[in-house]
Image: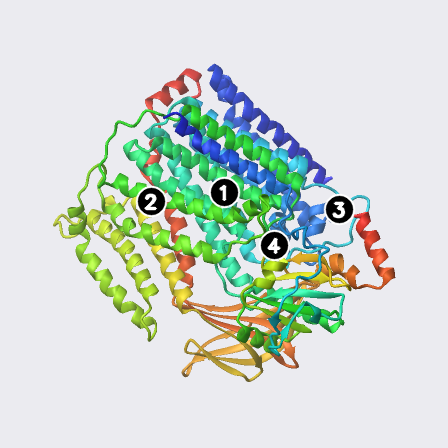
Amino acid sequence: MIPEIGHLALIIAFVFAMGLAVIPMWGAVRGNSAALNLAPTLAMGVLLFVGIAFAMLAVSFLKDDFSVAVVAANSNSLLPAIFKFSALWGNHEGSLLLWVLILSGWMAAVSWFSHGLPSVMVARVLSVMGMIAVGFLAFSLLTSNPFERLLPNIPLDGNDLNPLLQDPGLIIHPPLLYMGYVGLSVPFAFAIAALLGGRLDASWARWSRPWTNVAWGFLSLGIMLGSWWAYYELGWGGWWFWDPVENASFMPWLMGTALVHSLAVTEKRGVFRAWTVLLAIFAFSLSLLGTFLVRSGVLTSVHAFASDPERGLFILIFLALVIGGSLLLYALRAPTVASRINYTAVSRESLLMVNNLVFTVSTIIVLLGTLFPLVMDAFSLGKYSVGPPYFNAVFVPLMALVMPFMAVGPLSRWREDSAARWLHELLVPGAVVVVFALALPLLFGARFNVWIALAVLLSGWVAIGVLKDLWRRLGVGSGYGLRWQTLTPSFLGMATAHLGFASVVMGAVVVTQLNEERDLLMKVGDVEFLGGYRFELTALSRQAGPNYMADQAVFEITQGDKAIATLVPEKRRYFASGQMMTEAAIDGSVWRDLYIALGEPVEEGAWAVRLQFKPMVRWLWLGGALIGLGALLTVADRRYRRQSTSQSAAIAEATGLAG
Amino acid sequence: MRVKRFIPLAGFALLALLLFKGLSIDPTALPAARLGQPFPDFSQPELLTEEVIGASALQPRPALVNVWATWCYSCRVEHPYLLALAAQGVPIYGLNYKDESEKARQWLSELGDPYRLNITDRDGTVGLDLGVYGAPETYVLGPDGVILHRHVGVLDEAVFERDIRRFFAAPGRVAQASAQEGGE
């Protein structure tokens, strides 16, 4: 009964979404305020019924209802309850439902926080989001019904959740990532609404900016967690693979990065308007494209969902309608009159344009690399795979290129600035950074490492830019005391995110350059030295977990006379699937991770073991978290809460729906 | 001026066409020309003996040809299952693909050696002739030396039982396996 309630709720949600897609849009065209004002109610209706459907599926998972096909395929009665719950989104059908739930959550948030906006705008935005919801609900109902039953042959037990996914990381990684992915639908909807209304101005940019920052912040956090999960769960210590599915989430992030910066220019200066609209369309289009790539089976990947050409065709048609439609609208409606607002080549506008160029080119580079195998295949030119060497060779220089500008950006002035002033501001700090760049790499190892020197130079430069800006804002040395009020959430968020970026670069370069690893055959009592630490295998044993059996090895790690850690890596065999899983053991700290993974038992009492010493690897995720949190912090800025305009007040009064 | 605004739309139209074409392609499928063809002849050193061998050295058959490398992490995942298969008597030949022979030998001595012999393919030329897409990959070589099947990705028990067992099973089992396949 419960799955049927869920299915019914999903159908009702679809009806609400249809209403939302049509009625307010019709109201906006005809000037019918009753129809306009229905938008928030309809959005709430979608949220309510998708929420019910989601809850019913969750109950089916928690109650081990193996008559439901997804539950039988992805859960097991022995699975711990928390994983039964997260198993809901460890598969195509359930994750699609999560996608729609988060989309309706964003719709509800837009209707909740947009009291100050003209109701025509809110109606258009929600209606555009409603159209997206229609597409995804139809996709779910027609091709991927999560409530499909296995009747009459109900399995006695489920197939179990893929052991790789039986991990706390999976409980939060997909929801965070989807918050970001789907959240980009909000700036997209704002852009479409603005194009429809012919109102692409600074206030449009101010309305969509906080939403963009939040979505992009969640996307950053989601990607960061995904990388962290891969690092400790896949068992071999890698943190980024340029896998098509990773790229699918990375492309919207790159485009979002450009969008976040471009919106700043549009809001403050009113320039780049058409470009910003285009970026908003692109960012969400890449989210949709990612969904297509992951679920259609056109590309091979380690973590693609079970693919199905029918589903692929459905998403492709949807993609063509949404992206094709919005780009057509852009072609017809984007402002063609060149902006009258001027700026010179040496100005903050230009620096932000560099950011936009670099991130757009990076997105295209990643897109080309991701689609290249498909292109070659489509023209029967052979089978190819594009690996990390391509991406690293193109992507790393691009990031290095943008960093010199990152330090100057926050210090620069709008409209017109002078290179002499930049030189004056940054000469001394720049010289300090150069000294550090030459000296610090020597501390890491006996040999001077050019790459680390470069990383210190560029990251230090970015950090200096942030600190110098902080210094100037506070008015240190001006004799009037510190001006704390200048530290707005906008500024603090930007500063945090930029420092985070510098941290990611440091972590990535140092761990790539100084990583040490050794594959060994070890018996109890064997000792090995790595990175200045002594690893001793002291015991081997076998332990039973709730749904698996594990071989455990105990390692005592010491440095000189000092005990550092006891690490217990495991090799697990899961009962239901018979799958083997490597559970790595990690001793982490700010400066280095010690990473041990068990390979295979090779002979009696001896195991293949991989020991790794990974310096500064945590800076990657710390930086990722700072980027995400920085973006979220900007929303607290006061100017986003003073949104009401005289125009919106007038419309609200006219329709009798003030506030 | 106006025309410029249509560039993104045109770009997307091309992309959509490509994706549409992509839907009808199975990325893991072997180029059709290779299936049913004999294993391409080669002349490469064996990994351990360093003696130059050719396709005729791949005896007995039917057998598996497994493409692997020490830089390939999935190969490490797959390795124990290959050991198990070899222990069951399934002949497996290795194609050590774009790898350093020294590391490869060390790998085999540390993790165990499931291979009857290993073709050293440092430059990937054999892989190119074969149409290798990446490692790991596994090919089924029929009794007459013809390629019967290709699997891209990690070979595990489920894949072997579903797709490959039938090439090795007794005649009765073969009939059963193809009947199952027809029923799917």
The label shown at residue A181 is: 1
Alpha carbon distance from label 2 to label 3: 52 Å
User: Quadrant location of the C terminus of chain A?
Assistant: top left
Alpha carbon distance from label 2 to label 1: 21 Å
Task: Name the amino acid type tagged 4.
Answer: Ile
Which chain contains the residue that carries disc 1? Answer: A
Discs 2/1, front: 2
Which chain contains the residue that carries disc 2? Answer: A
Task: Name the amino acid type tagged 3.
Answer: Ser
Discs 3/4, front: 3
In terms of sequence position, does the residue under pointer 3 or pointer 1 come before the other? 3
- Tag 3–tag 1 contact (CB < 8 Å): no
Q: Which residue is mark 2?
A: A355
Task: Name the amino acid type tagged 2.
Answer: Asn
In the shown orientation, is residue B6 left or right of residue A483? right
- What secondary structure is marked by label 4? helix
In terms of sequence position, does the residue under pointer 4 or pointer 2 come before the other? 4
Which chain contains the residue that carries disc 4? Answer: A
At 22% from the left edge and 37% from the top edge, which residue is drawn? A344
- Tag 1–tag 4 contact (CB < 8 Å): no
Q: Is residue A323 visible?
A: yes
Q: Which residue is mark 3?
A: A67
Characterize the local packing of mark 2: few (<14), some (14-19) or many (20 or more) Cα atoms within 10 angstroms.
many
Q: Which residue is mark 4?
A: A82
At 67% from the left edge and 50% from the top edge, which residue is drawn? A62
